[in-house]
Image: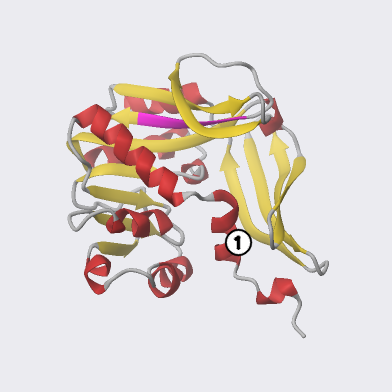
Amino acid sequence: MKKLAQQADRYELYEESVQNVEFEVSFYKKMFKRSANREAVSLREDFCASAKISVEWVKKSKFTKSYAVDLDKRVLDYAENVSSNDLTSEQKKRLHLIYGDSISYMSPKVDIVSACNFSYWVFKTRDKLKKYFKNTYKCLKKDGLFILDAFGGYEAHQELEERTKHKRFTYVWDQHSFNPVTNDLTCFIHFEFKDKSRINRAFKYEWRLWSLMEIKECLNESGFESVDFFMQGWDEKKNEETERFYKTKKCDADPGWLAYIIAKK
């Protein structure tokens, strides 16, 4: 009999562990409506992986459309054959899966570009990061928004493992190595199961840990005039994170924090 790890789908486990696409799409739409005073219709999801955000986006109305961009053909195949299975044929026509490099791919102009799950941290120099930001700027409509996320706090500089228990498995976030000189960060995701089996290094990330101010400066230098930070809230009674993100220019020196960065064209 196969072990649970052998039966598991690592993309499905990832989505269950770290993604809440309903919240993310709702947050994007709310932020755009607040900024542009109209409904967002078009989304470009960079580094899309299984494209679950884009899939959720096209479900919202018969007018919404999305462009999901990734350099990995395997995840785009997964998006086409698995993630989009519950879409109607009409919805699938509005979901465009693009094999391409986000740093240079020129999509039609869209209302929102998103680069989340810290994916843009693959760019480790200011020149490459700004090249990506400048390309994004060109692909946005005149009132478009660029939405990114970031994490930090002093624990982000540490080599550590964090375990989160789910019903079927345990999610393991492994900050495997960190170089304080370059801010290079190597992370893995592992999945552990009740039968003691394990998917080791299901995902690997080699990033630069960028600070919020470095990101803001690069965005400004790439043409974005307005850049705001939205920090994740904390429930003191439950001692856990909330789904509330509040706009701020200052926050506590916490061990860990999560933020959205919203840049307006």
Depth order, front residue of 190/40: 40
Q: Where on the picture, by quarter, is residue 90?
A: bottom left
What colouring method underlies this structural image? secondary structure
Residue 2 location in percent, x, y?
Answer: 74, 82
Residue that appears at 57% across and 56% down? 16
Instruction: Inspect this view and state whether residue 133 appears.
Output: no
Tell me which secondary structure the magenta stretch mostly adopts: strand
Taking the magenta stretch, the answer to whether it contains residue 54 is no
Residue that appears at 47% across and 70% down? 74
Residue that appears at 67% across and 76% down? 7
Depth order, front residue of 74/18: 18
Question: Which amino acid type is marked by label 1?
Answer: Leu
In this rendering, the answer to whether 206 lies above or below 87 is: above
Q: Residue furthest bottom?
A: 1
Relative horizontal placement of residue 47, taking residue 165 as reference (left or right) = left
In this rendering, the answer to whether 198 lies above or below 43 is: below
Q: Residues within 10 Å of mark 1 (few under 14, many from 20)?
A: some
| Span colored in magenta | 257-262
- Give the residue number, with chain letter if any, for mark 1: 13
Secondary structure under tag 1 reads helix
Residue 206 location in percent, x, y?
Answer: 60, 48
